[in-house]
């Protein structure tokens, strides 16, 4: 097991060093930066597109709810078991819904990744704790389980589609690593494993061609249901330097919404800037609200970039 764990650590380290994971690319001292460039994602609300966004929420978010996990496994015998394909499809449906909110390509399930994630979920269930590098003394360790733990988002206390919500919310996780991997633009395949109250979502492995998007934000540009507007907002650009970045947010009447920026570590998907609002309003908002976001002072490839986009928070009824 020790050799497997060492190999997993090494792969992750090499992955970061080659910048495939969106690790930081720092500008060397004296590097000349060109004049600022602005990237604007245009958005104009209309009743038809709002109706389509609401329908998408009802069909693919609410429609992926389930109270049935259906895990067939056994902790005592260290039998990882499995879960119904219907559960895995609902988890995938929810993940892809979140990715579409950000304008990202959908992903598919990989059977090998799911088998490793299932073994990882069993390890976390058996030891009533989560660890990406489980100690050698833990029970139910397997090679596949250790690989699954190293390359997966891990959750305890919630299984099924609800775990996907926790990964995107990432409340209390300063670096937003779970959100960043789940919303990594180049991600093409995932695996999912569950027990009755643990989940592992395999997210580090299958990466394809990066879509031509200027950034990944959560909430992203366009419509988002108010219940899914979480406390922490994030903005990601591959190899960006956010050390001098600023964020301003205002509504369509020009009213400002002050924010508190939070630094995040590199090495988890794309480089990311996050913030919270000084007055957290999202979960008490009772009417539609469009917020215009400007992220300035982002250093990317020898340029200082400014990004502008609009988030339209929409009510969804009871």
Image: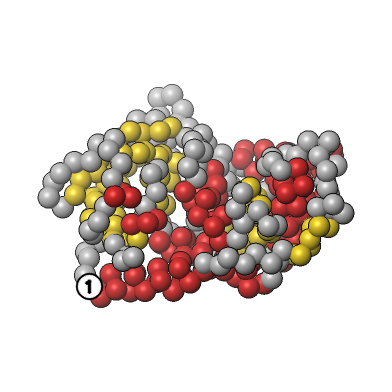
Q: Quadrant of residue 163?
A: bottom right
Residue under the image location 39 percent in, 48 percent down: 230
Q: Position of residue 257 (x, y in %)?
A: 23, 41
Label count reads 1
- One can see residue 180 in this view: no
**Residue lying furthest top:** 29
Q: Residue at x 39, y 56 (%)?
A: 228
Q: Nearer the viewer, residue 191 or 243?
A: 191
Image point 69% across, 67% down: which residue? 70
Query: In the image, is residue 102 above or below residue 297?
Result: below
Q: Does residue 295 appear left or right of residue 251 in this picture?
A: right
Q: Which residue is mark 1?
A: 47
Quarter of the image for residue 18 reads top right
Label 1 secondary element = helix
Residue 102 makes an appearance in the image: yes
Residue 115, percent from left and from top: 75, 61
Image height check: is 297 above or below 85?
above
In front here: 250 or 131?
131
Q: Nearer the viewer, residue 181 or 131?
A: 131
Quadrant assignment for the N terminus: top right
At which x and y percent is residue 44? 21, 64
């Amino acid at each position: 097991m020790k050799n497997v764990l060492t190999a997993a650590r090494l792969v992750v380290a090499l992955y970061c060093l080659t910048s495939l994971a969106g690790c930081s690319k720092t500008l060397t001292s004296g590097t000349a930066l060109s004049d600022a460039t602005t990237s604007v994602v245009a958005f104009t609300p209309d009743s038809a597109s709002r109706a389509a966004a609401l329908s998408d929420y009802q069909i693919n978010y609410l429609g992926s709810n389930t109270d049935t996990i259906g895990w067939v496994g056994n902790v005592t015998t260290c039998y990882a078991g499995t879960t119904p394909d219907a559960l895995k499809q609902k988890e995938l449906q929810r993940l892809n819904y979140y990715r579409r909110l950000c304008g990202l390509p959908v992903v598919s399930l990989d059977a090998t990744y799911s088998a490793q994630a299932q073994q990882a979920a069993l390890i976390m269930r058996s030891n009533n704790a989560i660890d990406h590098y489980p100690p050698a003394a833990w029970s139910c360790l397997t090679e596949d389980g250790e690989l699954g733990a190293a390359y997966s988002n891990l959750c305890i206390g919630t299984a099924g589609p609800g775990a996907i919500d926790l990964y995107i919310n990432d409340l209390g996780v300063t670096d937003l690593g779970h959100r960043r991997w789940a919303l990594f633009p180049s991600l093409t395949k995932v695996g999912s494993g569950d027990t009755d109250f643990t989940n592992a979502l395999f997210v580090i492995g299958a990466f394809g061609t990066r879509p031509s998007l200027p950034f990944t934000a959560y909430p992203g540009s366009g419509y988002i249901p108010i219940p899914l507007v979480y406390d922490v907002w994030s903005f990601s650009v591959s190899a960006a330097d956010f050390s001098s970045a600023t964020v301003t947010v205002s509504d369509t009447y020009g009213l400002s919404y002050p924010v508190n920026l939070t630094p995040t570590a590199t090495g988890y998907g794309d480089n990311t800037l996050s913030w919270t609002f000084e007055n957290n309003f999202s979960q008490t908002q009772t009417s539609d609200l469009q917020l215009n976001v400007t992220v300035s002072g982002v250093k990317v490839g020898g340029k200082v970039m400014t990004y502008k986009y609009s988030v339209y928070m929409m009510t969804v009824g009871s």
